[in-house]
Amino acid sequence: MMQNGRKNILDFGAVGDGKTLNTEAIQKAIDTCETGETVYIPAGVFVTGALFLKSNMTLYLEEGSVLLGSGELSQYPVLYYSFEGLKAECYASLLNAGIGNETVENLTLEGKGTVNANGVELFFKEMEENRGKRGRAIFFSHVTNLTIRGITIRQSPAWCLHLLYCNQVEVKNVHIFTKYDEEGKRYEGIFNGDGLDIDSCCNVMVQNCVIASQDDCIAIKSGRDQEGRDVGIPSEHIYIRDCEFHSGFGIAVGSEMSGGVRDVKVSNCQFHDTFSIASIKAPRGRGNVVENIYFENCTHKNESKEHEACKWFRGALYIDQFYGYDTFDVDKKKQITEGTPKIRNIFMKNIQTETVAGHAVYIVGLPEMPIQNVVLEHICASGEYGLVTKNVEGLIMKDVMIKPE
């Protein structure tokens, strides 16, 4: 029974036994939710397919509750939305909002429960059927005033929490696990399993979160190549603070950044066995600009040799404009076009990093468009390799100690 604007999914026929399919019951609770009301998920394991949220509602997951993704592909319609910077046919995600350019506002997802997308099973099924790109655990698009607090998000077929074209976002006290289960065992088979993707979003605060990722812990993106430039929606005014990152590749900007990325501030974060702290990836063809990026007061220790420096990742602190290139000539200029990306005004301050894999610091720009204005201040960095810089104009280093192995 609904009490004080709360709709309990049990009253719509949901059963939390870990077996019964509850998609219809939960969706009915959502669809009948009126402005300002809450759909309440009590303790229990509720198997469900894709759910579609709407404006002016809260989805509340009680402690001990689990929304568990069904392993049946029929529960995930193929829709047209964005993945890796390009619009494509994609399987629906477990939780969805704003699909099809629908504008959503005042949406809250909170509680101490868990969203488990059943990614290991769905990954193989979606790849085999191949009717679209893999879905995410949560995909929210075109949402203004979005709050995500307290919940745990686990194993997705692809990226775990994907935010696209959202404005005024708070992600607080959220735990995201795309690499390990509750007992520390690795989810087998999933690749490209980012934790949180902030994609052409504005005014985003990420605070007091814990992310253990199979790929980038947080990736900040804004579309790819010509399509991304045509849409032209940047990611900007993004603040990440007081977070912990375990495994994966730290915080990345790019490589899809064709709408532009600006005003990103990362502070007071700890990185444990991540390959990198910070990476900025803007290869030829992307165009637009990455600027005014700040990393400060961060610590990093990587004792894992699972990954080595390669074309996909370079080291602890790196800016790479030849990302993904098998071979390249750092001295050979190409013609400047609208697809030539620019990187400028990058600041890294008060950072301690120690890694057994990759470069301590790697900064390599394009000869036709050098990286401009990079400031490294109060940095103590040790790595398998030391410092590499090329095609940088205005590199300032103050109180920097680099210790190659």
Image (cartoon, rainbow, N blue to C red):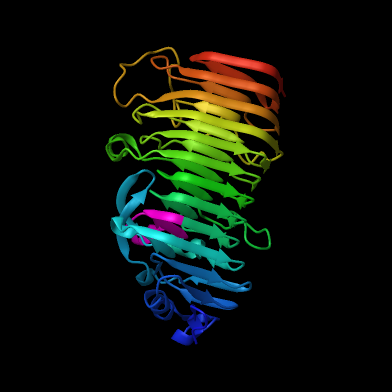
**Picture quadrant where residue 401 is located:** top right
Q: Position of residue 162 (x, y in %)?
A: 45, 52
Mark count = 0
Q: Residue at x 38, y 15 (%)?
A: 368
Q: Is residue 121 above or below residue 360?
A: below
* Quadrant the C terminus occupies: top right
Against 39, residue 195 (above or below) is above
Q: Residue at the location (37% across, 26% down)?
A: 284
Q: Position of residue 148 (x, y in %)?
A: 53, 58
**Residue 89 in sight from this viewpoint:** yes
Q: Is residue 128 above or below residue 242?
A: below
Q: Which residues are magenta?
A: 125-145
In the rendered image, residue 120 lying in the magenta stretch gets the answer no
User: In this view of the protein, can residue 215 be seen by the observer?
Assistant: no
Q: Nearer the viewer, residue 179 or 60?
A: 60
Q: Position of residue 326 (x, y in %)?
A: 44, 28
* Residue drawn at the location 32% of the way across and 53% of the way down: 81
The reply, left or right, for residue 142 in relation to residue 195 is left
Q: How far across and how far down the image is residue 306, in percent?
A: 63, 41
